[in-house]
Amino acid sequence: MTEEIILKALSNVQDPDFHKDIVTLNMVKDIHIDGNKISFTVVLTTPACPLKETFRKNCTDAIRTYVNPDAEVGIQFDANTTSKRTDNKALLPGVKNIIAVVSGKGGVGKSTVAANLALALAQGNAKVGLMDADIYGPSVPIMFGVRGQKPGMVDVGSSKPMLAPLERYGIRLMSIGLLVDERNAVVWRGPMVSSAIRQFVSDVYWGELDYLVVDMPPGTGDIHLTLVQTVPVTGVIIVTTPQDVALADAKKGIAMFMQAQINVPVIGLVENMSYFTPAELPENKYYIFGKEGGKKLAAEYDIPFLGQIPLVKSICDGGDAGVPVMMSDDMISRKAFEEFAANATRSIAIRNANTDATKVVEITEFRRH
């Protein structure tokens, strides 16, 4: 057995997302041969890759089919999270991907989706941060059980100390709800809100992250424009429910990011509250708000459909109790979020491989119609 023969065998293993073999994609390294034993490392595009076991099986089968049927195959996984940032990285220098989670209207569970997406990515060994950019209705302090806690300061050698995000369940958190008394309403005009978003980017030490998930406010407005004009957003994830009224507003969100002046890639669309599943009847699905409206909308705009999240009481209860469902034993909801996160990571990797580099959006003016 030689390294050349092993690489030739592994060239029969395809990456299903990029439609090329893993040798051509330079995903194989550190091949070691010791008698009947073969070991090597497969480098993935993200630590949260959902295809690890698929790669393990296919690589093992390829070695035993084309090299030695009795080979003992040991496979290690490494990850080099892809990023298409080409800016000067003056802001968020250690963040590889900035993912905005948006919705056309409130009440569709956008914050729940953003929180559990971040947790699912972190459980896949990715380094993850969650920025609560919903200034008027911050949810992170309640959903993560950190109400009343205040972020500290950290000296990172810059001109001034920076805010240190709280850490909970393995992810880094920042929210306006951690900085102001929750009993007081945030009564700010647009410029003040935009300034707060810029501070969350420039004055918070996020450190090294594979993904910074940004929970955006509902609608399309100042905060959305401020974010894409301040940092290069990798892409957006649209959250909707199957209801016609939610779908109509989701179309506006898709249209905003697709228009030529902004042109931020849409990573995909996820449908929340897709169906109701009672705890005592886990196999039953009741389509309370309509059926597969999100899937049809994704097909209409030719964007990836990332999954369906059921309407389950434990999701709501967990958020209120400060224990998101990804940290619970509700396997139905956890599986739905895991599948959604897996599809999102694959869509992000494909976006980074096939789409232009991320960049800060420069908007001079909007035409009035």
Image (tube, rainbow, N blue to C red):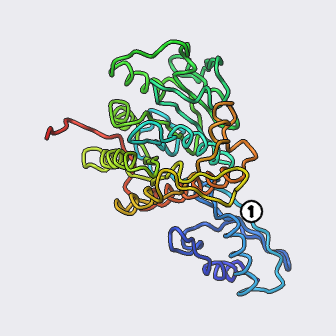
Q: Nearer the viewer, residue 339 or 3?
A: 339
- Number of marks in picture: 1
Q: Quadrant of the C terminus?
A: top left
In this image, 369 relative to 285: left or right? left
Image quadrant occupied by the N terminus: bottom right
Task: Count residues near mark 1 (Cα–Cα under 10 Å), then give few for <14, some for 14-19, many for 20+.
Answer: few
Q: Position of residue 324 (x, y in %)?
A: 66, 38
Q: Residue at x 54, y 26 (%)?
A: 175
Residue at the image point whose x is 59% and y is 34% from the top: 207
Image point (71%, 70%), residue name:
56
In the rendered image, residue 363, in percent from the top left (x then y), is placed at: 25, 37
Left or right? Give the position of 148 relative to 229: right
- The residue labelled by disc 1 is 76
Kind of residue indicated by mark 1: Gln
Q: Which one is in front, 88 or 222? A: 222
Q: Quadrant of residue 178?
A: top right
Q: Position of residue 64 (x, y in %)?
A: 76, 83
Vertical order, 57 against 282 (above or below): below
Single out the residue that lies furthest toward the left: 369
The image position of residue 50, as x and y in percent, is: 64, 60
